[in-house]
Image (cartoon, rainbow, N blue to C red):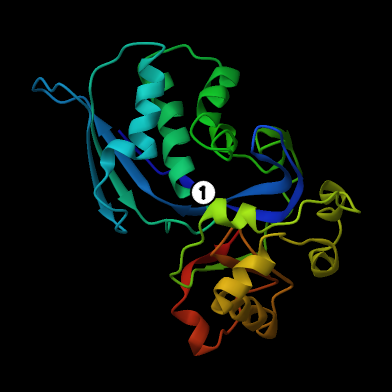
Amino acid sequence: MVIFPNAKINIGLRITAKRSDGYHNIESIFYPVKLSDALEFVVPDEVISKDILKVTGIDIGNDTDNNLVIRALLRLRGINSFPFLKIHLHKVIPVGAGLGGGSSDAACLMNVLNRHFSLNIEKSGLKALALELGSDCPFFIDGIPSLGSGRGEILAPVKTVLSGYYLIILNPGVQINTGEAYKNCNPGVPSSSLKESIERPVIEWKKLIMNDFEDFAFKKHPVIGEIKEELYGSGALFSLMSGSGSSVYGIFQKKPELAQKLRHFIIWEGVM
């Protein structure tokens, strides 16, 4: 069986408080996009003694035992047994890019295995298991536009606000360490509601919606901030870095003519 775990962008990301457990509380809109990996699993005819993961596409290193896909399998096997699998993951979503690719791979596999092997795990149970793998993993269980709070696991559906707009996602090829990004942020309570802000016209978002990780990311890798400015210069209604970086997206009324220096950064574009 083949599935296509999709990426997400963050429309706004505010760090509201540091928690006593070492994590941070956030407020962000998680919004699914059509950029996706490909993930295939089969139950082999021959007997195997462990799950086998093959990864192609973007190089993510050789440590497949710690890949979120394998860790997701182990979490499910802690509840119900099912055969060992051969898995092929073809990576298209960049790593360390703020797009949730690894989290999506893990959560989407949990979803499909729960159905395929009739594991009968409720959605709430799947989300709890997904949270053990990453704060944004629970979002990908349903994968609908959602306001995330707490660590990101408290999810409330929001309106589909980007239908018909033209989205471009760019990645400069640098990675941002999420832990380092959190260490360099300054938590604070937002003065406005993100859920209310996204209901305003997109052209107004520039004054209302921000990502608290941008200051750190732009200082560490100035190219990220340069991409954002170039997108505005190309006519973007709104542009923002996604997650803790390093990807930046631009929202346009229609397909723009981008400057040549931006084109080689594009990893996905299309109508939402």
**221 lies left or right of 204:** left
Against 233, is 251 above or below? above
- Hey, which residue is sitting farthest bottom in the picture? 260
**165 lies left or right of 61:** right
> Which residue occupies 36% across, 36% down?
69
> Which residue occupies 51% across, 29% down?
130
- Hey, which residue is sitting farthest right in the picture? 191
Q: How many marks do you count on the picture? A: 1
Residue sitting nearer the eye, 106 or 19: 19
In this rendering, does residue 155 appear at all? yes
> Which residue occupies 15% across, 26% down?
44
> Which residue occupies 8% across, 22% down?
46
Residue sitting nearer the eye, 145 or 14: 14
The kind of residue tagged 1 is Gly
Residue sitting nearer the eye, 256 or 150: 150
Residue 136: horizontal and vertical position, in percent? 58, 40
- The image quadrant of residue 11 is bottom right
Residue 200: horizontal and vertical position, in percent? 86, 58
Split into 4 quadrants, where in the image is the N terminus? Answer: top left
Secondary structure at numbered mark 1: loop
Which residue is tagged 1?
100
- The image quadrant of residue 10 is bottom right
Residue 265: horizontal and vertical position, in percent? 47, 75
Residue 236: horizontal and vertical position, in percent? 69, 76
* Mark 1 surroundings within 10 Å by alpha-carbon count, few (fewer than 14), some (14 through 19), many (20 or more): many
- The image quadrant of residue 243 is bottom right
Against 140, is 35 above or below? below
**54 lies left or right of 268:** left
Against 35, is 40 above or below? above
In this rendering, does residue 243 appear at all? no
